[in-house]
Image (cartoon, rainbow, N blue to C red):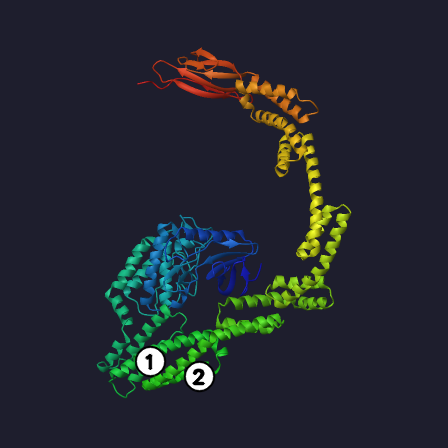
Amino acid sequence: MIVLFKGQRLIDRFVLLEPLAQGGRFEIWRALDESRDTQVALKVATGEDTVRWESLQREYSISQRLDHPGVLRFDEPARDETVMVLPMLLAAGDLRPLRGKAYTQIVPLLIELCDVLDHLHSRGIIHRDLKPSNVLLDFAGHIRLADFEIAAIDGMAPPGAMGSPFSASPQQRRNSEPSTLDDIYGLGALGYELLSAYPPYFPSKPGAIEQQVPALKPVHPLPPVLHALLQRCLSTDPLLRPSTARELREDLAMLIRSPEGIRAIRVEAVPLEQILEASSSRRGWLPWVAGIASVALLAATFWFLPRLAPGTAEIAVSRSSATVNSGLSPIISDEEKQQQVLFNERYTEFSRALEELESQAAGVWGGESFGAAKSMGELALAASSTRDLSLALDRLGLAMQRLTRVANERPAMLAKLLDTANTAIDDGRLEIARQSSERALLIDPENTAAIRTLARIVALGPLLPALVEAETAQLAYDNLRALTLYEQVLRADPENIKARDGAARARRALSSDRYAAAIGESLAALRSGRPEVARDALSRARALRGDGAEIGALQAELAAVGERTDLEGERNRIRDLEQAENWGDALKAYEGLLAKDRSLEFARAGRNRVVPRAELSRRLDGLISTPSRLSAPEVRREAERLLAEAARVKGDTPVLRSQVEQLNTALQIYEKPIRTVFQSDGQTRIVVQRIGIFGTFTRKELQLKPGRYVVVGTREGFRDVRREINVTPSGPQVVIDVRCTEVIS
């Protein structure tokens, strides 16, 4: 079993970038799909496990039955002798970070999930493993349902597959027949976990199958109706659960549309300007402002700025809010309000940019400018906390300028690190190359050049001694040894400049020696009457130096010899064909020679000689291969003419004698009558065309030669019957039933 690592290339297409998850049977990696130049999530299993390969194929097959934007998109699985992979759409994350959030954030996601489940159930699919890690969010913040490994298709689930014990229904845990109500239970368990921060029964696992789920204890207050709805979903009796995903969706949507839900949503959406305006007429408003602004900003952070550190914007807002009520004055001027709003907006932008650069290791490569930007940002926040908003904005502007300067230096720093890494590889300083590549990946984790450089380092490490040995061999004029070693290095690292240049020098040196040797060998072979050896040596010389002066003369001399040799060889070959009575091929060969040179007298005479024999052989083979035709009188006459023609041929002709014997045997077979039985009703008048009229009977035996016959039955008041029969010499006896049964109205 191979070990997966960052930078590894799989199936000549995918480059592993970073691990995302690891389970018992599969690993999930973020990977670059080089065939489409895009990033994907890659489900990977090593080895050649048939069960796991069938699981990947099954998961892909399920996805092809579904057509909903809330279902994670899968590409066709692929495999080689070492790994098997299932490419998937790369998502922003899953629902696990939302554990313990307010219901106003959770319920809209559950509604989306109900829509997805309704689609699955309409297509005969039951998911059976609804847990936060299997429900992903795309980069727009919408649901993407993943992991169909244990899903049921048309009521059939993989044997022994149960899913998470915390989200599996009691019926699922007792291996009952899969039901869509299992997914209703699973969605209830998912909502339970997101609202309480823990799955049902946690930290222990479910006890008895019929044990009721412990009461939900949410982190934040819930509307009683939502609490009751989730308990319904988690009922041990499936008949007490909502009957369909669509019904559950409507219940959740009504909850959001209720006055309680509307009030909660409106609280999150209160603009900051309105909150600040409340200061002139409301005492004790500060906790409310800070709390609501934090919720709004955190919601924005989750949905639109996934890489922003949680609480950054909240700090700015809450501190500025505290400033307003610091005891200086309960009244805030319009100008101060506008400055506060402007500061909050710009500080959020600054925080986002700062966090982005920190994630790219700007603390390592950004130097004094980055440190100064962070310090100035802190000074700006301090000025805001004392209500010196003009100073705060000035300092924030300086901080943003320095941060922008650092960001603008990022491409140059990235290019410098990559150049350093490649130069160090060429010089054999692999540790410096590794450090530079890793720093480049800190700046740009998805940089394919840095990833490839790390892969080069891994591949080249064991081959550094070979590179040194190759240089030593070249100095000792052992160019063949040097070339072998250089090529060994290049197979592992095709971009290695030292190995590429060294190999080129070795090839040039070897080429000069080999050319002279090949020309000498070709000339010697030509003089000793060995044109094939001469031709082979000349070909090697041409490959080494195609413009050599010696090549043209040798080539002309070989061509003249070759023509004579080729013509004589072809003449001998055709003579062999005639002796073997292979007249068709002999005729084609003569015609081929005449197409090239009409003056070849032997070819013209040979063609005239073999034409009648080729035609006779062809016609005899035609009758032998289809003996059933001999039942026709005209064909029998043709066969007799061909036999007479064959008898006039003189000489030793074993093939012709065999053809004659086969045809005579076939004629005898098709001349011998075959016992044929007819049945009727005693009222139908029977006629066998070309044979005779046999009147009415119930059973009659006739002796018929092999061939095709038409049998006609007539009866007054009834529709005529017409049957075609085929009497074969080797077939089983057939009873032929002919009777008129259809009354004419």
Q: Amino acid type of disc 2?
A: Ala
Which quadrant of the rendered structure holds the C terminus? top left
Occupied quadrant, residue 487? bottom right
Question: Looking at the picture, how far across and down is residue 485, in whole percent?
Answer: 68, 63
How many labels sit on residues? 2
Q: Nearer the viewer, residue 397 or 299?
A: 397
Question: Looking at the picture, how far across and down is residue 727, in whole percent?
Answer: 51, 20
Q: Amino acid type of disc 1?
A: Phe
With 252 as the anchor, is 645 left or right in this view? right
The residue labelled by disc 2 is 372
Q: Contact, CB < 8 Å: mark 2 with mark 1?
A: no
Question: Looking at the picture, how far across and down is residue 11, in whole percent?
Answer: 54, 57
The residues tagged by marks 2 and 1 sit, at their Cα atoms, a distance apart of 19 Å
Q: Nearer the viewer, residue 54 or 362?
A: 362
Occupied quadrant, residue 383? bottom left
Q: Is residue 237 in sight in this rendering? A: no
Under tag 1, what secondary structure?
A: helix
Q: Nearer the viewer, residue 668 or 61?
A: 668
Q: Is residue 676 above or below residue 395?
A: above
Q: Nearer the viewer, residue 62 or 79?
A: 79
Residue drawn at (45%, 58%) of the image:
88
The residue labelled by disc 1 is 343
Under tag 2, what secondary structure?
A: helix
Residue closest to the far bottom? 328
2 or 1: tag closer to the N-terminus: 1
Question: Looking at the picture, how far across and down is residue 405, in whole percent?
Answer: 44, 79
Which quadrant of the rendered structure holds the N terminus? bottom right
Residue closest to the far right? 528
Q: Residues within 10 Å of mark 2 (few under 14, many from 20)?
A: some
